[in-house]
Image (cartoon, rainbow, N blue to C red):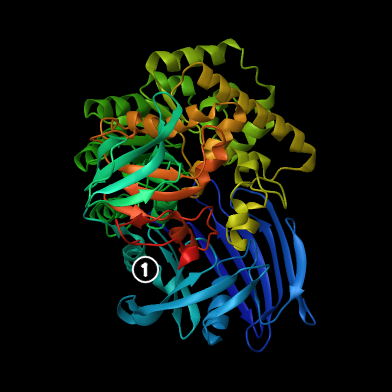
Amino acid sequence: MTAAGPIGTLAVTENGNSVDSDWRVDDNGRGAKLKEHIEVDPHGLPLLWKIEGHSEVGAPVQERFIVDGSKGKWTSLDDSGEAEMKDSLYVPNNGTPWSANIYLKNLLAAKTLTKSALPGGSLRIEALREVSIGTGANSETVKAYALWGLDVVPQFVLARKGRFVASLSPGWVLVEDKHKADFEALSALAGELSADTLRLYTKKLTHTVDSPIWLTHARIFDPKTGTVGTATNVGVFRGTITYVGSDRPPADAQTVDCEGGTLMPGLFDAHAHLTDWSGPLSIASGVTFGRDPGNDNDSRLLLDRRIESGEFMGPRAKLSGFLEGQSPFSAHLGFVIGSVDEAKDKVRWYADHGYWGIKIYNSMNPDFVKPIAAEAHRLGLHVSGHVPAFMSSERAVRDGYDEIHHINQLMLSFVIDPKKDDTRTPFRFTALGERMAKLDLREKPVRDMLALMKEKKTTLDPTMSVFAQLLLSRPGKASPSDDTWLDHAPVVIQRQRRSAVLDVKPEQYSTYEASWKKLEATLRLLYKEGIPLVPGTDDMAGLLLHSELETWVRAGIPAHAALTAATLGGARLTGQDAVLGTVARGKLADLYLVDGDPTKDIAAIRKGRLVMKGSAVYYPDEIHEMLGIKPFASHVSLRRATAAISEPRSKR
C-alpha cells in the first residue's frame, strides 16, 4: 500500500515444507510480476528456490537455486555459480518479499544473528523493539527488526513469533491482509524505526568542533573559471568560511592537512527523491545540497526538520511539490488532482509550506499546465516536471516550464506522436531505445526547440546515468554508469545492477546502443548551445551523482564544466549562489575534499576524504563502512596543535 491505497498483492500458499508466492504490483504504469516456489529443509533452510516473471520495468526473470550435496548452485538470466553451503543463506536476485520470512527464521536461529550469504556477503538481523499494531479484534503486539545486508540501507520488518508480518518504509507498506486498514499507523511506525536507527548512526558519525577549523595545503576548485589552484589554506568558524589565503592557522584552530587534494564546494543533486537513508549516502559522496523533485509531503517535511536540527545527517534541500493528474497510471506522491481549481489550491498549499517549486507529472491534463504554471509563478515558485502524456516538450516550455526533468522527457516529442502515443507507461523508455537512433539532431523541430529553451532560459536535468542503466544494462552486465563504483557495493547490489531493466532482446541491442550514442550527442549539443544543465540522480543517492558526472564527461562535456554544473550551477538554479557554490569568505562551509584533481580525471570525484556541511564534519569512509560499502579513500583527520583528534583508521 501507499497513501493512495493498495497497489499490489503478495499471495502466499504453504504446503508442508514448500511455499508458493505470487507477487504483483501495478504503480505508475509499472510493477513486478513474479511467481516463486521455495522448498525448505526441517530447519527452514532453502533447498530449492525458483522464480519467474518480470521485474519492475518489464525485464524477464528466470532464477533457480538448488542445494546439491554440500554445494549451493544458482543460475539466472544474469549469472550462475556454485559454492559450498556452510550454513549459508541464498539471496535471490529477484525474489518476492516473502524472502524476508526465510531470512527471519534462519537469522533468529543463529547465535550471532548473522549468516553468510550466497553468492557473497552476509545478512544480519537487529532486534529493535516490540510494537503494537492494529485496532479492535486485530490489535496485537509484534517485534520489529532491521535486516542488514539486503541493500546499503536496512530493511525494516515486523514478525509474530519469528514469522514475517510486514515490510515497512515511510509511505510504502506490505502487510498481512487483516491489517490493510492500518496504512497510516504502519507508515508512521516505519518512520519511527528508521529514525531511531539513523539517529544513533548520525550521532556516532558526525564530528563537531567549536574552535576554528583550518584546512591547509588545499587546492581549491573554482567553478567560475573551471580551474584548480595552488595549495592554500581555508579557515572555517561555526559553519562559515572565514578565510582563504596563505596565512597560518590561529593558535586555537584545529587543522586538517589536505595533502594537496582538491577542495570543492559541496556537490548538488538536482533530482534527489530523498528518504531518511539517502542522507548518509549523499553526505558520504560530498553532496551537501540538492533539490527534491517530489515526495510524500508529510514525510519529506519531517525529514527536513530532522536534517536541519542535526538529528539526521543529510543535505540541505529545496523542495518541489508533486502534482499529478488522475488516471489509471497516476503516481501517488504529493497530490493527485482532478481540476484546475484543485491544482491551484495545491500550488498555494506548497507555497504556504515553504516549497521552492512544483513538479508536474505524467498524467496531468495538458490543458491544466498553463494555469498551474501561472499560479506557481505568481507565488514565486519554480515550475518543472515530466512532459505530460499527449503534450509536446515545446508546448510544456511555452506553457510555463522553467525546467524539464530527464532527457527522455525533452526528446520523446521528436520520436513519437505526442498527440497519440501514451507516455504514462514504460513506453517512454522503450520508445527512446527503439527510435532515438534515427533522429537527426539537425532537423528544424530540434533546432527550434533549442532556440526556445535558450530564449526562455529553460534548464534540463538530464539524469543520463539512469538512461544508461535502462538502455545499456544486459543480463549479467551492468551499465557503464556503474562500472567505477559497483565493486565497492554489497554483492546483493552488484547482482541487482548486473541485470537487464527493460525487456530488450539481443537483436535489439545494437539499436539501443545507437540510441544511447544519440543521447550522448544530444547532451553535447545542449551543452554547446548553452542550455543550462544540472546533474541529478533519480537513483541511489550520492554514488550515482558521481556516475552522472562521469557519464557527462564520457559524452563529451569537459570535466570542469560538469563540476561547475554540480556546484555553482546548482546554487544558481536554486537561488543560493550568494551563500553556496564556491569556496569563498562569507559563504557556508559546505566543502568536499577529494584525493586528486577531478578536472583532469573525473573519477577522482569518488575519492572523498572529508566532507563539511556547515559546522559538521564527516569522514566518507566511516559512513560507507557503516552502509556496507568498501571505501574509495581513507579520510584526513582533524588535529589539534599538539595531538590528533581522530587518526586514520590504519593507525588506530
Secondary element at tag 1: helix
Rendered image quadrant of residue 160? bottom left
Residue located 43% across and 24% down the image: 532
Q: What's the amino acid at mark 1?
A: Thr
- The x, y position of residue 492, in whole percent, is 61, 62
**What residue is shown with label 1?**
197
Q: Residue 135 location, x and y as percent?
A: 31, 76
Q: Is residue 342 visible?
A: no
Classify 624 as above or below 129. Answer: above
Q: Position of residue 531 (x, y in %)?
A: 46, 20
In the picture, measured across the screen, residue 535 lies left or right of residue 582, that is right
- Label 1 crowd (10 A; few <14 / some 14-19 / many >=20): some
> As drawn, which residue projects farthest toward the left?
352
Residue appearing at x 65%, y 39% in the figure:
471
Give the x, y percent position of residue 565.
Answer: 43, 30
Query: Which picture quadrant has residue 317?
Result: top left
Location of the N terminus (image quadrant): bottom left
Q: Is residue 23 above or below residue 588?
A: below
Identified at 54% across, 42% down, the residue is: 604
